Image (tube, grey):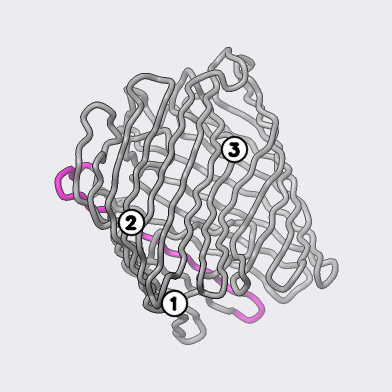
Amino acid sequence: MSRCERYIAACAAVLAVSSAQELSAQAPPILPSTRVVQAGPASLYPTIALRNVGTDSNVYNEGATPREDFTYSVTPRLYAVVPIASTRFVGTGTGDFIYYRTYKDQQSINGYLEGRYEVLESRIRPFAVTSLSTHRERQDLEIDLRARQTQTTITLGSDVALTAATSLTGWVRREHTAWDRNDQYLSVSLAEQLNFTADLAAVGARFRLTPLTSLIAVAEIQRDRFELSPDRDADSLRVAPSMEFANGGAISGQLRAGYRSFRPLNPALSRYSGFTASAGLRYEVVDLTRVYIDGGRDVKYSFDPLQPYYLESGVRLKVIQRVIGPIEGVAIVERWQLRHQRIGGSSFDGRHEDTTTLGGGIGFRFREQMELTLTIDRTERTSSQPGRDYERRRVLASISYGL
């Protein structure tokens, strides 16, 4: 185990951490709806989950010779909220310990740490956020290799209240992404192609529509610079209003949609100007029906030096319907499209790939803090490039518990 892996594992153990959705750096954190543990002035939100226990029929995403294995992951998590006079600190720790019985090269220890300090009761409310994440997992739908990626982020910003419901907001952020220098995918060095630093500046306004709902309208300028492949450098302008729904209502999460102008500095690469979006929403009806929606549409960087970026769009829908007593039915539908941009080509005329997942199962919700699910799903990828098609089936069980 490397020094970095040992460090993350130690932090995860101390903080009781897990892999939950990362908090948006510019938005006030939305805390999980689980049991609260008081430790002096601190409020703790701990959970632990045993996830994805079962068989994966194609652990390497291979088309010709799929290999099956038994797998599971242990996922602890902790949110900690510490009030300090008229300010507060919110800490998040996540960890993911993934096991494979036969193919040990697929095992990994992953972690995420974030700290946010913010002023609450003032007309001017500055905030600062810093985070560290390290993952040896599939980072997206394009790269099938489980490669180590480390991200560090720091954000500084402030809200300035104009009225009880309206405030100006702005922030600057620097994010650095680094891949392990020894990892190669299809004979391409991931570090050489994908190590980069993103600098972002944003300004806009926040409108509190209800006690649980806010509208944020901002404009962002982003500058991406690649350490070892400067021909990939690009600038972006994004205007993307978002809605934030705090816990306590029928809807919680975030929805963002708007316009992005993506301008590569390499004149041989076409620009993209168009619609982008992201969503992470939960909708619940009287403890009977829960709907989870995750999706988006945006430009991402590719590992392929001849197709440096692609447009990714898709959605994942999960519906949980209570049938009788603690028994619930589960349905999962997921669909993603990748459209690559070739150097010297017209708009997204490179490799095209479609990935579809269908699944379902049964769940048992014993209480608000404890849930067991048993699911079967099938994933299929079709690609315009020979050799990248694959099919995978999984039979999995997961149990989560709010301590």
Q: Quadrant of the C terminus?
A: bottom left
Asked if residue 91 lies in the magenta stretch, the reply is yes
Q: Is residue 7 visible?
A: no
Q: CA distance from mark 2 to mark 1?
A: 20 Å
Q: CA distance from mark 1 to mark 3?
A: 35 Å
Q: Is residue 374 visible?
A: yes
Q: Nearer the viewer, mark 1 or mark 3?
A: 1
Extent of the magenta region: 84-105
Q: Earlier in the sequence, mark 2 or mark 1?
A: 1
Q: Position of residue 376 (x, y in %)?
A: 32, 52
Total number of numbered labels?
A: 3
Q: Earlier in the sequence, mark 2 or mark 3?
A: 3
Give the amino acid type for the residue marked by disc 1 in the picture. Answer: Glu
Mark seen at residue 368: 1
Secondary element type, mark 3: strand
Residue at 58%, 56% (x, y): give it: 24
Left or right: where 368 falls relative to 265: left
Q: Residues within 10 Å of mark 1 (few under 14, many from 20)?
A: few
Asked if residue 252 lies in the magenta stretch, the reply is no
Left or right: where 194 falls relative to 135: right
Left or right: where 346 falls relative to 63: right
Q: Earlier in the sequence, mark 1 or mark 3?
A: 3
Examine the residues drawn in magenta and state their main secondary structure.
Answer: strand
- For label 2, the residue is 375
Q: Position of residue 32 (x, y in %)?
A: 50, 70
Give the amino acid type for the residue marked by disc 3 in the picture. Answer: Asp
Residue at 56%, 68% (x, y): give it: 284
- For label 3, the residue is 298
Secondary element type, mark 2: strand
Q: Position of residue 265 (x, y in %)?
A: 63, 23
